[in-house]
Image (cartoon, rainbow, N blue to C red):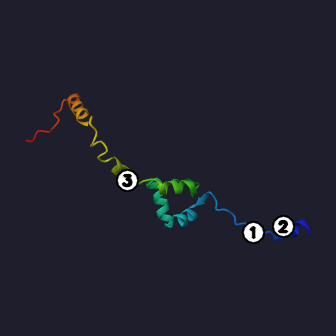
Amino acid sequence: MTQSTATARRPRVPKPPPEVLTLEEAAAYLRASEADVVELATQHGLPGRNIHDQWRFHKLGLVNWLLRPSANDRLLSHAGAMADDSDLEAMWEKICQERGRPMVEESE
């Protein structure tokens, strides 16, 4: 058996997907329209690059973007974080004194 015959009989190994995706591939991966992907990239922090009017996206960047919490989730996670802080009252009093303001606004 020659080497070329042995090579011809080997099963084809599927080619792994590219790490860098085109706009069309990124849209398919995210299951979104191309217009939505461009808007996400230009307005909402989806990691991608426009190179000579052609968008490119790194697959791992898209995965990381999908996994990170939204801006609203990050803000909500901080809401009330200091509520149980025993030093909060003293900090607030010091801030008000330094600014020359009362701790409670006086009503008219």
Residue 84: % across, % down = 27, 42
Relative placement, left or right, of 55 versus 11 is: left
Nearer to me, 31 or 85: 85
Q: How many marks?
A: 3
Residue at x-position 28% and y-position 39%: 85
- Distance from the alpha carbon under mark 2 to that under mark 3: 54 Å
Classify 10 Å Cα crowding around label 3: few (below 14), some (14-19), many (20 and above).
few
| Residue 2 seen anywhere in this rendered image of the structure | yes
Seen at 56% across and 65% down, the residue is: 24
Sequence-wise first label, 2 or 3: 2
- Quadrant of the image occupied by residue 10: bottom right
Mark 1: few, some, or many residues within 10 Å (few <14, many ≥20)?
Answer: few
The mark found on residue 73 in the picture is 3
Residue 99 in the image: state x and y as whole percent. Answer: 22, 30
Q: Decide which of 88, 39 is in the foreground and name it.
A: 88
From the viewer's side, name the closer residue of 73 and 83: 83
Q: Is residue 87 above or below residue 28?
A: above
Residue to which mark 2 is pinned = 7
Q: What's the residue type where badge 1 is placed?
A: Arg
Amino acid type of disc 2? Thr
Mark linked to residue 12:
1
- Sequence-wise, which precedes: disc 1 or disc 2? 2
Q: Residues within 10 Å of mark 2 (few under 14, many from 20)?
A: few
